[in-house]
């Protein structure tokens, strides 16, 4: 910068010496045009220095994380109480909205009864296995008796001491008892399968009802919506009597988080050549005319929407961009050093200058320009 000032001063001195002091040449319109042309080109030194040693973002705004408050309920539910005031700070876990608990309490009670019944049914299944096991034993005893009677009747009939019909009757009874044993064995196997159908040591019928009960209790707990983090609710439109949850993607309020807010500034790509995280920053916030806030570069977002292509069957179509138009901008995240971050509401605008080389002589010039902008905010915009 010193070299540029010396060149500009020397050029002005030379013009004064030639045309006004010594009057070695006449100062006319052609000389004036040439002189201004050369002088403007000398000023380019300062433009280049400012762009790379102290780049300025003319658009910067405070960004905060916002949470869309969406009821986590399976069906439209009545809002019974609003427990928060708009724009009032709340702590994490503080109740915000109360929804009608009754439908979900009824569902929990219903499933609790079904769970008790399912657990009792497990004992019934255990008893069934014992019943069918004893039934098989009894039928086998009946089969043995029928086989004995069949043999006895057949022997008597063969000797002519008994009717042939008795032998045929007991033969049919043996077949019936054998079929009954197979049926009882199948029933015993079915009862045993139902009784031993387990997952992680719990009967599957009990586990199924338990899962439904856990889900019902989850929804019951979510009838009270609490603050996800420290912050505040803005643009509160919820009132008792409102039905929420009919559109699962629709939020009922916006929750602005207090933590991790930052200043997001847009810089032309060609100005970011020497910008790195950790470099000092000064910002003029429009909300506070005449004040300058210091900070540091958090990160440079390595991309912009101009490079994003959505999946489609259309091939990229590149359009010619005139060379006199500047390149697209990249966003730079900046952390302000002010201990009271609540001073910077979401959406607050301003300008930010990054000092890539704080020792450069161009930095004071940028500081003067930034402070001039901040003080000018006392009167601009011109609206009463």
Image (spheres, rainbow, N blue to C red):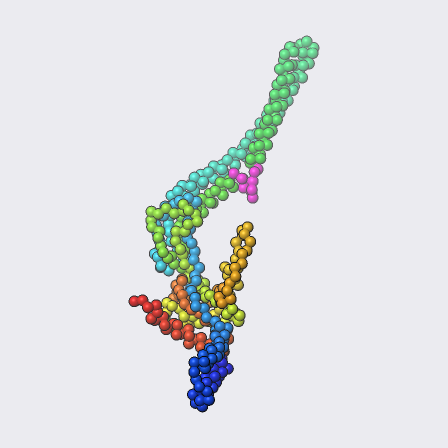
Q: Please, is residue 148 above or below residue 15 in the view?
A: above
Which residue appears at 47% of the width and 80% of the height?
34
Q: Please, is residue 2 above or below residue 143 in the view?
A: below
Q: Please, is residue 374 above or below residue 32 in the view?
A: above
Residue placed farthest to the top in the image? 160
Image-quadrant location for residue 165: top right
Q: Please, is residue 325 above or below residue 109 in the view?
A: below
State the image coordinates of residue 163 (x, y, percent, origin top left): 64, 10
Which residue appears at 46% of the width and 87% of the height?
25
Foreground of the two, 368 or 184:
368
State the image coordinates of residue 107 (x, y, percent, origin top left): 42, 41
Whether residue 272 is in magenta: the answer is no
Query: In the rendered view of the protein, which quadrant contains the C terminus?
Result: bottom left
Image-quadrant location for residue 145: top right
User: Does residue 202 appear anywhere in the picture?
Assistant: yes
Left of 163 or right of it: where is 14?
left
State the image coordinates of residue 174 (x, y, percent, origin top left): 63, 20
Left of 303 or right of it: where is 233?
left
Left of 157 or right of it: where is 114?
left
Q: Which residues are magenta?
A: 196-205
Foreground of the two, 347 or 259:
347
Left of 184 or right of it: where is 12?
left
């Amino acid at each position: 910068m010193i070299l540029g000032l010396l060149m500009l001063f020397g050029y002005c001195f030379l013009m004064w010496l030639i045309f006004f002091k010594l009057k070695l040449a006449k100062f006319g319109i052609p000389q004036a045009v040439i002189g201004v042309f050369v002088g403007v080109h000398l000023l380019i030194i300062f433009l280049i220095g400012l762009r790379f040693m102290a780049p300025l973002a003319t658009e910067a705004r405070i960004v905060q994380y916002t949470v869309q408050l969406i009821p986590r309920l399976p069906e439209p539910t009545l809002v019974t109480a609003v427990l928060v005031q708009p724009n009032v700070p709340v702590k994490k876990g503080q109740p915000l909205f109360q929804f009608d608990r009754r439908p979900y309490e009824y569902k929990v009670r219903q499933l609790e009864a079904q769970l008790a019944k399912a657990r009792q049914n497990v004992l019934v299944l255990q008893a069934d296995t014992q019943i069918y096991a004893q039934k098989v034993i009894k039928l086998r005893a009946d089969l043995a008796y029928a086989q004995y009677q069949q043999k006895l009747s057949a022997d008597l009939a063969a000797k002519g001491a008994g009717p042939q019909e008795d032998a045929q009757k007991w033969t049919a009874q043996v077949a019936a008892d054998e079929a009954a044993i197979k049926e009882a064995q199948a029933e015993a196997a079915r009862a045993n399968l139902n009784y031993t159908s387990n997952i992680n040591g719990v009967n599957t019928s009990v586990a199924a009802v338990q899962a439904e009960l856990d889900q019902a209790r989850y929804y019951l707990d979510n009838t009270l919506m609490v603050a996800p983090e420290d912050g505040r609710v803005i643009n509160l439109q919820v009132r008792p009597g409102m039905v929420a949850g009919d559109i699962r993607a629709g939020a009922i309020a916006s929750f602005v988080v207090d933590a991790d807010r930052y200043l997001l500034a847009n810089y032309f790509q060609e100005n970011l050549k020497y910008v790195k995280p950790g470099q000092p920053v000064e910002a003029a916030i429009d909300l506070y005319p005449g004040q300058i806030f210091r900070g540091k570069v958090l990160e440079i977002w390595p991309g912009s929407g101009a490079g994003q292509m959505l999946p489609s069957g259309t091939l990229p179509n590149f359009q010619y961009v005139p060379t006199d138009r500047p390149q697209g901008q990249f966003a730079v995240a900046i952390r302000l050093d002010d201990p009271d971050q609540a001073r910077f509401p979401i959406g607050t605008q301003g300008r930010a200058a990054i000092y890539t080389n704080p020792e450069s002589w161009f930095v004071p010039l940028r500081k003067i320009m930034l402070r001039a902008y901040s003080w000018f905010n006392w009167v601009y915009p011109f609206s009463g």
